[in-house]
Image: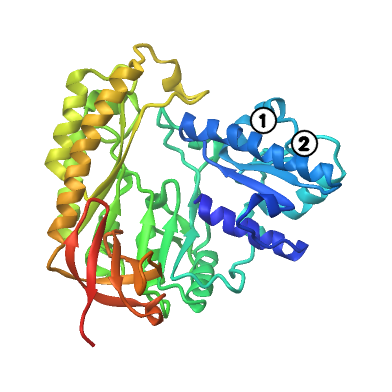
Amino acid sequence: MNVYDSARMAELLAPLGYCPTEDAADADFVILNTCHIREKAAEKVYSDLGRLNEIKRARAAEDKRLTLAVAGCVAQAEGAEIRARAPYVDLIFGPQTYHRLPELVARAARASGAVLETDFPAESKFDHLPDTRAPGTGAAAGFVTVQEGCDKFCTFCVVPYTRGAEYSRPARQALAEVRSLAFQGAREITLLGQNVNNYQGEGPDGKIWTLSRLIRAVADIPGVARIRYVTSYPADMSDELIAAHRDVPALMPYLHLPVQSGSDRVLAAMNRRHGADDFRRLTERLRAARPDLALASDFIVGFPGESDADFAATLALVRDVGFAQAYSFKYSARPGTPASALPDQVPDAVKAERLAVLQDLLDTQQRAFNERCAGRTLPVLFEREGKRAGQLVGRSPYMQAVHALAPKSLLGAIAEIRIVAGHANSLAGERLAA
């Protein structure tokens, strides 16, 4: 979602004369678009700001201005702290206010201190962003935010406080943006949301559309060959959405479905609305609908009060379900969340030990899944050139990176590739004879 938001910010700045640069030393305006989900990500913002301030001072010595901004969820949650710890920042704004960026830039140019804009506006930012994407997007894969915010209030999570209440864009807006991306060459569309499978946007017919209904409409748009969606909440996986995995060929057989823990006691403390066996049954239903479906997930280890038995239950769930990919983290207390005040905080050394054990199991499953792909022929969407001469890199339906010798004319196209080897994090393939 931050990739999407960053692209929209660049579009808003283009009429002011800005264009992207790869080197901060060349920039007139630097925006750090931030994530607050873990402490490490938030602290990295301050170290990056210190580095950027050195560039800002050097530019000032040459009578040149560098405007420095912090956007996103760290800005939303820690605006006052950013002002205190990094008073040289010119502009601080949250993820729901970036549609005001041209106005904020003008205010920052006149202000003597940081401009802070972190109130939740009454209007939706999407009502102030164009439905069509800026010309030149041209990527083979595109992101479209269709839902934002979350009403679940998991005890470890800051999203309800930084992104606000759940909001679903009208289907008309989302579909117009998809058409724009497809017209520019996007073959794959990922529908984004913090709780995307609870999408409930107004349809062109005036009725409330579900995510399943939206997916079926996206699949009808010329040029769209692949559809994905992230991130999902297990308790909101409806029968209708499961059926879409069976019925819509363009919907990729890869689903990211965060479970967080395999312990019912820990899940209850997290305020998750599912148990471990609920998750097991859900994955069985999904695989019954789409037998070639691969699953990804998220796991938190060391949640307050997590015992050895709780952690063992997580390992048991991983073994029972089997994952093609997963993200796993040590619990990170976020300020203002209920879990941060819970007793029995797990020592960091214990969290680190458990994380290593879990990641070893998940890495073994991922490598085994990749190795099982050897000998298969998979459709690969090529997105960039590889490091070797004549090599392209693309993605399989299962989100694996695939390396193959192929002509540059296949960039942005989907080609049938025979997989010759599966590695820990990628696949090696060869192009079928024409």
Mark seen at residue 114: 2
Q: Secondary structure at mark 1?
A: helix
Is 350 left, or right, of 375 in this rendering? right
Vertical comparison of 250 with 108: above or below: below
Q: Amino acid at mark 2?
A: Ala
- What's the CA distance linking mark 2 and mark 1? 9 Å
Determine crowd level at label 2: few under 14, some 14-19, many 20+ residues with C-alpha closer than 10 A: many
Position above or below: 399 against 86: below
Q: Nearer the viewer, residue 18 or 249?
A: 18
Residue at the image position 64 percent from the left and 59 percent from the top = 21
Give the colouring mode of the picture: rainbow
Q: Is residue 97 visible?
A: no
Residue at 38% x, 49% y: name it: 231
Q: Earlier in the sequence, mark 2 or mark 1?
A: 1
Which of the pair 150/47 is nearer the observer?
47
| Label disc, if present, on residue 414 of the rendered structure | none
Dot 2 falls on a residue whose secondary structure is loop
The residue under label 1 is which amino acid type? Ile
The reply to whether dot 2 and dot 1 touch (C-beta < 8 Å) is yes
- Write down the residue under mark 1: 82
